[in-house]
Amino acid sequence: MAVFTNHSAVGVREDLSDLIYSIAPTDTPFLNSVGQGTATNTTHEWQTDSLAAVNVGNAAVEGADASTATLSATTRLSNRCQISQKTISVSRTLEAVDKAGRKSEQAYQLAKASKEIKRDMEAILLSNQVANAGSAAAARTLGGLQTWLNTNGDFGSAGVAGSLGTTARTDSSEAERTFTETILKTVVKEVYESGGDPTILMVTPAHKQTVSTFAGIAAQRYMAPADQPTTIVGAADVYMSDFGTISVVPNRFMVASNSADDVALVLDPEFAEVAYLRPFETNDLAIAGDQANKQQLIAEYTLGVLNEGAHGIIADLS
């Protein structure tokens, strides 16, 4: 007698998991490390100041008149607010049908867009993009961190630092350099001498591996008890510098933020912030008839480099 099998049957339900798997990275180390501020105009401004140089000859004659005051004004700085947005458009039919892995396609796509904008912002904030006032036909852009760091840095032989968010860093025309501990020590020392207290070294994934090969770090063994496996320690998450402890933080989006050559950033997060003119908001867009549901996720923000001397940059790296 013939056996009726699955191959011939009609109406067998498909096996589609209710889970949706994605390994796309969503962590944003820079956004999470710096402060959050408020902008009140499309041009966000702040002031910096510094103390007079130390005077080892500061001695006065007894009974003498007071010396002439030598005061200095603050420095006024600014950056432009940039708008980043994503538009979600889902048909009413798609929203209505039974779906695997999510009940609402609109809500699922909106949550996905939120993660994508934050990734975009991370790369933009760390970039070598210059500030631009924009126009009726061109978008405003903020000056990325690389365009601000001028005081403390180590560049290739023909590399040039950026300035004030309006001048981009110039890649060296010479061969890219290997990231070394000597270069790192130089820039950390410069930041310290400028008055900063750096606590973060932000690097590309490849340079995170390079830091782990610095002297005294690589290939240590942790001897576990006999009933547990031995661990080989070949990574460094903390760098003990002469001027304090620095967390070594890999950033997946730093590669996309670079113009060509790679950089490493020595940061004092107390002196950087993301200022929002309009925090994240969702706008319902007009629809007609049975058109798709439309929503816009939008944020307007800028980078505040509260004092660029608190940070450092290592550029023109391979």
Image (cartoon, helix red, strand yellow):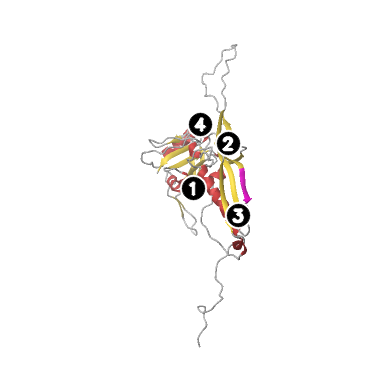
Q: Nearer the viewer, residue 286 or 104?
A: 286
Q: In the image, what residue type sits under mark 1?
A: Phe
| Residue holding disc 4 | 194
Disc 1 and disc 4: Cα gap in Å?
28 Å
Q: Are marks 2 and 4 in contact (CB under 8 Å)?
A: no
Q: Main secondary structure of the magenta part?
A: strand
Instruction: Name the disc covering residue 253, or none.
Output: 1
Mark 4 or 3: the one toward you: 3
| Residue holding disc 3 | 294
Per the image, is 238 magenta? no
| Residue holding disc 2 | 43
Find residue 45 and report its image quarter: top right
For label 3, count other residues whose C-alpha is less than 10 Å away and answer few (under 14), some (14-19) or many (20+).
Answer: some
Q: Nearer the viewer, residue 94 or 226?
A: 94
Disc 2 and disc 1: Cα gap in Å?
26 Å
Instruction: Name the disc covering residue 30, or none.
Output: none
Which numbered disc flags the more N-terminal residue, 4 or 3?
4
Q: In the image, what residue type sits under mark 2?
A: Thr
Residue 17, relative to residue 266: is it above or below? below
Q: In the image, what residue type sits under mark 4?
A: Ser
Q: In the image, what residue type sits under mark 3?
A: Lys
Mark 1 or 4: the one toward you: 1
Which numbered disc flags the more N-terminal residue, 2 or 4?
2
